[in-house]
Image (cartoon, helix red, strand yellow):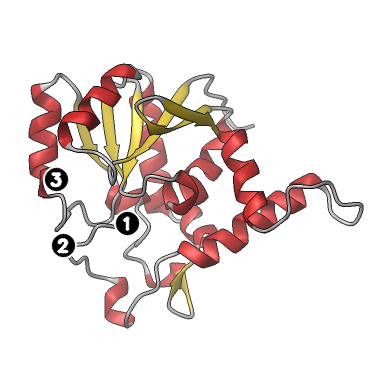
Amino acid sequence: MMEQYNQIIHTIGYAAHSIESFIVTLEKFNITAIADVRSQPYSKFKPEFNRDNLKKALINNRIEYVFLGDNIGARIRAPECYKNGQANYELISKHPLFQEGIDRLLKGMEKFSIALMCAEKDPINCHRTILICKHLKKYQIQIYHIIDANTFENHTQTEFRIMKLFQLEQPDIFMKDSERLAEAYSRQEEKIAYVAENEAAYMVNHTGFDNE
């Protein structure tokens, strides 16, 4: 039986923030640690969110920082997790690297109030939702997505928006609710999942991108 974690986790995207507004928002939601889930923890448009700069700013405000992009990032360095050059979230979620990252996250939740951080403002456009939070649901964790300093939504609301993207939000006599949700996840994954430029890209990281 899978162990249940009756805890809360948040997610946040930094794209619409300055470093100052980002920290203010974290404080408003009582976040005490950031788990950076970008595969490339750098930004050419917002250098203040480069890994070292961000870590320093957070620590100066008594917020811990951990990088988990090598484990639960969207661009896993494992060729077997790609189909036709595109990252496959189902395969990634079963990979030991991913599970190691989830285990570290669950362990951290025992001590910290954690927010998963990536770039995208809207959680439905990010792997933090379509890959990571879809998996975290199995642990009965309460998931909240921070949209901005004054707006957040729970994961059920987020999933409804994902279904609505594909006109799957209405009951259907031919599809169970779980099937409609699974179909919506699958379609959104196809839209956002990383596509490697070539085979070598499976195994290397590049810097300077404002995405996952």
For marks 3 and 2 on the same chain, the one whose residue lies earlier in the sequence: 3
Image mark for residue 13: none
Q: Secondary structure at mark 2?
A: loop
Q: Which part of the image, by quadrant, shows the C terminus?
A: bottom left
The quadrant where residue 140 appears: top right
Give the residue drawn at x 86%, y 51%.
Answer: 172
Write down the residue under mark 3. Answer: 51
Specify few, some or many for label 1: CA neighbours under 10 Å numbering under 14, 14-19, or 20 or more: many
Horizontal side of 39 relative to 20 (left or right) equals right
Residue 138 in view (yes/no)? no
- Distance from disc 2 to disc 1, alpha carbons, whole Å, reads 11 Å
Would you name the residue on which mark 2 appears? 208
Q: CA distance from mark 3 to mark 2?
A: 11 Å
Q: Residue at the spot x=7%, y=33% of the render?
A: 56
**In the foreground, 148 or 86:** 148
Residue 68 visible within the image? yes
Which residue type carries mark 2?
A: Gly
What residue sits 46% from the left and 53% below the top? 125
Q: Is residue 41 left or right of residue 124?
A: left
For label 3, the SS is helix
* x and y, in percent, of residue 107 in the image: 37, 27
Q: Which label's residue is closer to the chain start, 3 or 1?
A: 3
Q: Label 3 sits on what residue type? A: Arg
- The quarter holding residue 14 reads top left
Separation (CA) of disc 3 from disc 1: 13 Å
Which residue is identified by label 1?
Answer: 212
Binning the other alpha carbons within 10 Å of mark 3 as few (below 14), some (14 to 19) or many (20 upward) gives: some
